[in-house]
Amino acid sequence: MAGGAKARRLPRVVRERQMVDAAVRCFARHGYQAASMDEIAELAGVSKPLVYLYLGSKEELFTACIRREAGALLAAVDAGVGGPEVPPDERLWAGLLAFFTYAAEHPDSWVVLSRQARTQGEPFAGEVARMRDEIVGFVAGLIGEAAGEADVVITGRDVDALAQALVGSAESLASWANETPGVAAKEAAATLMNFAWAGLGNLMKSERWSPR
Amino acid sequence: MAGGAKARRLPRVVRERQMVDAAVRCFARHGYQAASMDEIAELAGVSKPLVYLYLGSKEELFTACIRREAGALLAAVDAGVGGPEVPPDERLWAGLLAFFTYAAEHPDSWVVLSRQARTQGEPFAGEVARMRDEIVGFVAGLIGEAAGEADVVITGRDVDALAQALVGSAESLASWANETPGVAAKEAAATLMNFAWAGLGNLMKSERWSPR
């Protein structure tokens, strides 16, 4: 019974963190439907009733996972990005680097956010959509700023479209980097920065591609 | 009984197409789990036993949907792209235009492929992954060719990474375009072409972005 006594001495917040850690791992590996509360409890080293007592139903636990991981990803990007005194391309670079580093260091978290959460309907899809909207908004802000500095007239819709393109390429590249041995976060960020910023830079100079 | 007699006169291939059409619509709107065989049968104007008889279980029906829609998307892109006598940027433009046109004209198909199919585990995820790999391979081929023409030395991994970035941005932009009123397929394709090709063009000229 030493284990039980020890378990009771852990503060609730620590226990909950262990349970959510275990849940993120199971949801990432098996998907929402196939993940079992039994496996989550076992992985967290607690009883199944304790998981239900602390975190509620499987649905509530999945929501808790998405919310926590989305918050952590946003916080990591936020912390990486400098203030408005830093030029927009440097801020985008810092944001991309923070994003790819987070995805590389938390692959299960990335799978849950980019894949598992999106197709289970509400409220899950909404949670992750809000996080994505926030990132798209941040990127759109940088593009708008860069356009302003370069005195380029660009519509709000063009800015939104470019931000969507950039975020989509970052998502795709993060998943590819995690599945490809030996790709470092910095390499993925540099590839995307070269790809995106060089292209955006040309747009800012109004050098557009056109069919010959 | 006129309806029944009429129904029996339709060739099986036509009936099956109606059922798969109805299924794509239901799966796109409700997701795999929530879509019901009752609704699919009703939408197709047939009895539920007939759906099971012709197309098997819900799982087999979903697989049939993914396979048919993935095939249609690939065929559309293939038909749009010219042969090797056309320069790589023109071929990419034609491929993007065909892709965005397909996604705009078949929004339910796009939702099933880009969203619903990916997270239901095997065999669904595998079906759509194969289609995506084929598109990434096509894009990687164009980038490799363009690099060759420009006499640029670029590693296979860089080519793969750029292809992943480009396909990810196309996916993101297609979903955004479908959800944003008034964005034409051609506009989305042009945005991405400007974004991507200008960036790739700079890479080919070895003009890389670097922190100041």
Image (spheres, coloured by chain):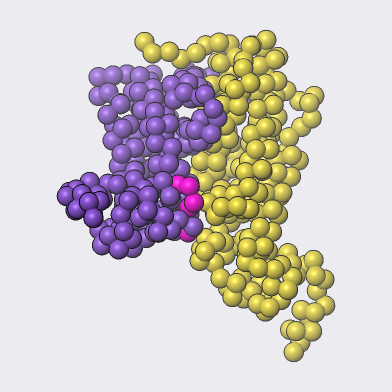
Chain colours: A yellow, B purple
Give the residue at x 80% y 24%: A85
Secondary structure that dominates the magenta span: helix
A19 to A74, vertically: above or below = below
Give the residue at x 45% y 35%: B167
Q: Position of residue A49 (x, y in %)?
A: 68, 78
Instruction: Tell me if residue A117 is in the magenta stretch.
Output: no
Indicate left or right for A99 with B156 as reference.
Answer: right
Q: Which residues are magenta?
A: B28-33
Q: Is residue A199 visible?
A: yes
B195 to B122, vertically: above or below = above
Q: Name the outermost residue toward the front.
A: B1
Where on the picture, by quarter, is residue B74? Answer: top left
Q: Position of residue A182 (x, y in %)?
A: 51, 47
Q: Is residue A43 visible?
A: no
A65 to A91, vertically: above or below = below
Q: Quadrant of the C terminus of chain B?
A: top right
A207 to A71, vertically: above or below = above
Instruction: Tell me if residue B31 is in the magenta stretch.
Output: yes
Give the residue at x 80% y 74%: A10
Where on the picture, by quarter, is residue B82? Answer: top left
Indicate left or right for A107 with A176 as reference.
Answer: right
Q: Nearer the viewer, residue B181 or A151?
A: B181
Q: Position of residue A110 (x, y in %)?
A: 59, 50
Q: Nearer the viewer, residue A35 or A191?
A: A35
Q: Nearer the viewer, residue A167 or B21?
A: B21
